[in-house]
Every structure is written in C-alpha cells, then in structure tokens.
Amino acid sequence: MTANSKFKIQNSKWAAALILHFAFCILNFGCAARSDHRERLELWGLGREGEVVAEMIPEFERQNPGIHVAVQQIPWTAAHEKMLTAYVGDATPDIAQMGNTWVPEFVAVHALDDLGDVARAVDQRDYFGGVWRTNVVGGHLYGIPWYVDTRVLFYRLDALARVGYPNAPRTWAELTDAMTKLQRDHVTHYAFLMPTNEWEPLVQLALTNGSTLLDPAGVRGAFEQRPFADAFVYYVDLFHRGFAPAISNAQVANLYDDFTRGEFAMYIGGPWMVGEFKRRLPASMQDKWGTAPLPARDAAHPGISMAGGSSLVVFRASPHKEAARKLIAFLSAPEQQIRFYELTGDLPARRSAWRAKSLASDPYFPAFREQLEHVEPLPLVPEWEQIATEIYGHGESVVRNAATAPRALADLDQRADQLLEKRRWMLAQRR
C-alpha cells in the first residue's frame, strides 16, 4: 500500500469520526433541547431552608410538568447583601425566601411584585393575622408567610412550683411576685436571664403595654410616650432589683448549663430553643422545664410577642410571575407546610397545618400556637434594624446607671427621628 493510499484511509477514518462526533452532538443537543423546553423558575432559599426546599421541588414539578425549578441555597449571613446586589445588577431570581423584617426595605426600592392576587388563592383567614401583616406595606401585599417565628417564655417548672406557681406567671403582677419569691427564697441565683444586648425582650414588653414603637406614619419615634416609657421602666427595674443579671450574651458561658444549675429560672426564646433544650439539657432536667406564652400586662390584655419568620416573595423583574405564583401556592398548601416542618422544625404559617400529629403531640409547642394568636409586626420601615440597635443600647445605658430613663428615652426618640429623616422627605415629595 502506498503512502498516499494510507493517507487517504486515515483521512477517511478521521472524516467518519468527525461525522459520528457531530451526529452525537446533534443528537445530544436535540435531547437537551427536548428536556429544556420547560419554563425555568429560579428560587433562592436561605440557610437550612434553602437546602430542604430542594427536596420538595420534585413533587411540584410532577404536578406542573411544564415548569423546572432551579434552587440556589444562600447562607443567611450573605443573603441580604446578595439580594440587594442582585437587585442593583438586574440579576434577581424569580422567587425568594425573605426574612419578614426585610420586606419593607425591598418594597421601598420597588423590587417586589404585588401579591394581592395570591391572597385569594391561599386563604388569608388560615394565617396568623400578626404574621400576615408583616408583608403588608402601604396597603399592598408583597409576601406570603412561609414559616413563622415568635418568642415565648422558657421556665423551670420545679423552681416556679416551689414559690407557688405550678404554671408560668400569666401577668406582669404574677411575674413580679414570682421573681420576688425566687430571689427571697434563694431558689435560683437570678429569676430571669435577659441579656442586655438583646432588644427583643424590651420591645416585647413595650408591645404588650400597647406601644406602637413609632408614630402611626412610621416617621418618628414614640419612645417617650407612656406605653413605651412605662415598659422601659419595668424592664430596667428587673435589673436594678436584682431579678436579672446585667450581662450580655457574650458573658453567658453556657446557657444550658446555667439553666440546669439554677442560675436563672426564666428565659425568652424562639422555637429553635425547643430542640436545643431537648438535646443539651441532661436527662434529669427533661421533666423540669416548660414553655408558656409571654406574661400579659393584666388579665384584660394578652402578652404580645413579635411576628417573625420568613415569607415567599416574587421580584418585579421576574419574567415568570405566573409560574412563581404556582410555586408559592404549592409551598403554602397545608400538607406541604406540615412536611416542611417535619424536615426543618420551622413552625407552619397556616393554622390548619398545626393539626399535624407531629406538632400536636409535642408538649412544648402549644405555647407557641397560643402566642401566635397574639403577635404584632415590627414597624414596617427599612430603618427598623438600626432603630432596634439603638433601643437595646439606650436600655443598657440605663441598666448600667450610665443614663437616666427620661434622658435615654428622649435621646432614643431623637436618634429614631434622625434615622427616619429620609423617609419623611420621601413621603413629603410624594405628597
């Protein structure tokens, strides 16, 4: 065989290989094209919820074969900045999980789509009213509650029973009486653990006392007004009377060990603390603790806690709004709410889902269920988190005798007014 013949044969082989290669690519492209004809919906989930929701998507896609959901999990610590960056860069997802306190901020920059039409599909009456209102800004609905969060009282059953309270105190008067007896009889070192760098306990006392925190327009502080001022004095008095130690979270070596040793008898915590108490308290303590709704101001006014949790929102720039609404309706269905609770431990946003055996049989969650009927949204302004930091800072200064209560409240109002100055200007321009 001549060299030229060998060259021709080799060329023929290469040609055949190339033909097969291109044929393979064309076939694959055709298959890919056939599999990618579905509408692609991008969902951003935060933290553990972002991982778990991916397990629920196959059923949604089975029910909606024309939609493919791509889930991206984002750490909570990076989520806020990433969403803002995505908005500025016109790269927002179609749908996202969003902490309730973030909703007003994203509404202010016109990032979110109005979901008023979805409200009729998911039955608003089945949701806890206070939590639902966290998503209503300016009379429009921008999110559908996905899971809920609030705070209740965790307490030592044995310690309170020793001072005449087989159940937790239900009013401020009972709470003061129980704390006085716990201290007097040396049942525990302190009656209450209330870290001074947390604003939530003070705000919950204020909400219980009828404070709106800000004025009705949300443009000025309402901290010198009597509902907040009286709650502020009650809060400070807990420390000055020795009922609570004037320490921050960083100074608490191990909350669970301290609770076991009797360093304190009461603590305000969220639903995640139930699992932590079950895991981290010794077996000898498992029948010695309980949960209860927050004490009321008096018999006629229930204890008010904060309405928290996460909601599902649709970004205005989404080209797949109808598909996004279908996914929200799916994830909001009671059976999916129950499954989500079983996968994550997050409390269902719908009342009907609380009938699930896994929730009804747990002795620690009825307190949360009762409290969720008495929750209020925090002020629906983007500046709230900055104002909240000022609240605990001014509270701590009075607890440590670095300022008087009247001076701190006046300063707090002044600081809130400064933070809300831009909001006042924007509202004035609209008018």
Image (spheres, rainbow, N blue to C red):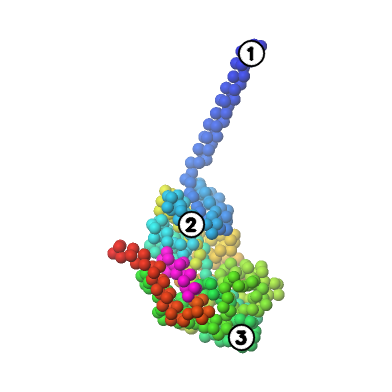
Which stretch is magenta?
A: 379-394
Q: Position of residue 62 (x, y in %)?
A: 53, 49
Question: 342 above or below 299?
Answer: above
User: What kind of secondary structure does the magenta stretch mostly adopt?
Assistant: helix
Q: Amino acid at mark 2?
A: Glu
Q: Position of residue 342 (x, y in %)?
A: 59, 61
Q: Earlier in the sequence, mark 2 or mark 3?
A: 2
The answer for how far apart the CA atoms under marks 3 and 1 are is 105 Å
Q: Residues within 10 Å of mark 2 (few under 14, many from 20)?
A: few
Q: Amino acid at mark 3?
A: Gln
Q: Are marks 2 and 1 in contact (CB under 8 Å)?
A: no
- All told, the count of numbered labels is 3
Q: Position of residue 292 (x, y in %)?
A: 56, 76
Q: Residues within 10 Å of mark 1 (few under 14, many from 20)?
A: few
Give the residue displayed 61% in from the left and 85% down from the top: 182
Is 388 magenta? The answer is: yes
Give the residue displayed 71% in from the left and 75% down from the top: 284
Is residue 117 visible in the rendered image? The answer is: no
Residue 81 is tagged as 2
Q: Are marks 2 and 3 in contact (CB under 8 Å)?
A: no
Residue 183 is tagged as 3
The answer for how far apart the CA atoms under marks 2 and 3 are is 46 Å
Q: Amino acid at mark 1?
A: Ala
Report the residue marked by disc 1. Answer: 3
Q: Position of residue 48 (x, y in %)?
A: 57, 58
Q: Quadrant of residue 239?
A: bottom right
Viewer-closest of 329 and 296: 296
Q: Quadrant of the N terminus?
A: top right
User: What SS does tag 2 mark?
Assistant: helix
